[in-house]
Image (cartoon, rainbow, N blue to C red):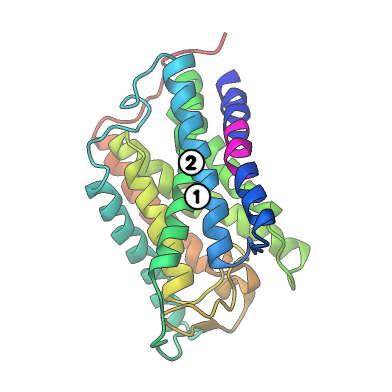
Amino acid sequence: MAQILVFAGISSAILLALGLPLLAVFWLTHVRIDPFSERGGLTVEFCLAAAAVLGYGIVTRRIEGRSLADAGLAARGIFSETAIGLMIGGGVFSAIIGMMGAFGVYHMGSVNPHFRPLLPLALFLCIAVFQETAMRGCIFQTLERHYGSGIALIASSLFFGLLHLGNSVNGLSTGQWLIGPLFLSFETGLLFSAAYLLTRRLWLPIGLHWGWNFFETSIYGTADSGAWENDPNTLFAGHTHGPFLLTGGAFGPEASLIGLFVGSYAGILLLRLAIRKGQWRSMPTHPAP
């Protein structure tokens, strides 16, 4: 389990090595970066993604002695599986929006003729690379080698969801604030973990994560785990209205029962495919001492 701590330490050191010179340049040139804007967010998330990938590569090769392919970073599928994941992630979230529309709690609004997709596409790709390298790369694989696929799936999914407790979301009761991260553990933690198991590579879960976030925020104009609400750069001026359990409120559709049902159902389908393919490991390959 020390690998997870070593990964965190090395990635943090790399992040400092990347971030401090950038901050110095911004300070010297009097450039202000808002981390909650698309440009500022892209800068921050690019550094996080680069630090995570480099840190994971160092831990994998230098400390564990594994190949990058064994760690889920094989060159095979890097473009095709990421693209497929992007489409599936967008499709799954479109199904969520479709059901919300059928219940009358989502309204698409007008089309934005000034929509600029490239910046949010890059931003959400960096977010996906950073989070999936950490979650389905380091954490899931370390747990699986020591405890098997079941424990790895449950623990990494819960950890992924509960990390979102750190998001500050205004206008929610304590119970509502807890629901979003809990639902995320099932609907996306399960979905992204199953995608990794199916291929044993990180590209499909990265693509799924990328498509989910991009369609949620930049296409349909809804909040993403409490962030990017009312972002003006969206394709549709969408908004939700209705009971919290059907809309997710300020947290976004991920905290709704509809998001929980659709995301979890898609995750179960992928997990069944992974098990049929023989990718499930009931026994650990490196039992904990």
- Count of numbered tags: 2
- Which residue is depicted at the point 53% across and 51% down? 45
Please tell me the numbered disc located at residue 219. none
- Which residue is depicted at the point 30% across and 39% down? 198
Quarter holding the N terminus? top right
Q: Residues within 10 Å of mark 1 (few under 14, many from 20)?
A: many
Main secondary structure type of the part rendered in magenta = helix
Residue 8 location, x and y as percent? 60, 31
Quarter holding the C terminus? top right
Q: Which residues are magenta?
A: 13-19
Q: Within the magenta stretch, is there residue 216? A: no
In this figure, which residue is indicated by the disc labeled 2? Answer: 50
To which quarter of the image does residue 9 belong? top right
- Which residue is depicted at the point 35% across and 32% down? 72
Farthest top residue? 289
Residue 276 location, x and y as percent? 25, 36
Q: Is residue 207 above or below residue 87?
A: above
Q: Give the amino acid type for the residue marked by disc 2 in the picture.
A: Ala
Please name whichever residue, 115 or 80, is drawn nearer the observer in this view of the structure: 115
Residue 144 location, x and y as percent? 46, 25
Q: Are marks 1 and 2 in contact (CB under 8 Å)?
A: yes
Image position of 115 (left or right of 143):
left
Please name whichever residue, 49 or 158, is drawn nearer the observer in this view of the structure: 49
Q: CA distance from mark 1 to mark 2?
A: 6 Å
Please name whichever residue, 76 or 278, is drawn nearer the observer in this view of the structure: 76
In this figure, which residue is indicated by the disc labeled 1? Answer: 46
Q: Is residue 154 above or below residue 224?
A: above
Q: Give the amino acid type for the residue marked by disc 1 in the picture.
A: Phe
To which quarter of the image does residue 156 belong? top right
Q: Is residue 171 above or below residue 124?
A: below
Image position of 211 (left or right of 75):
right
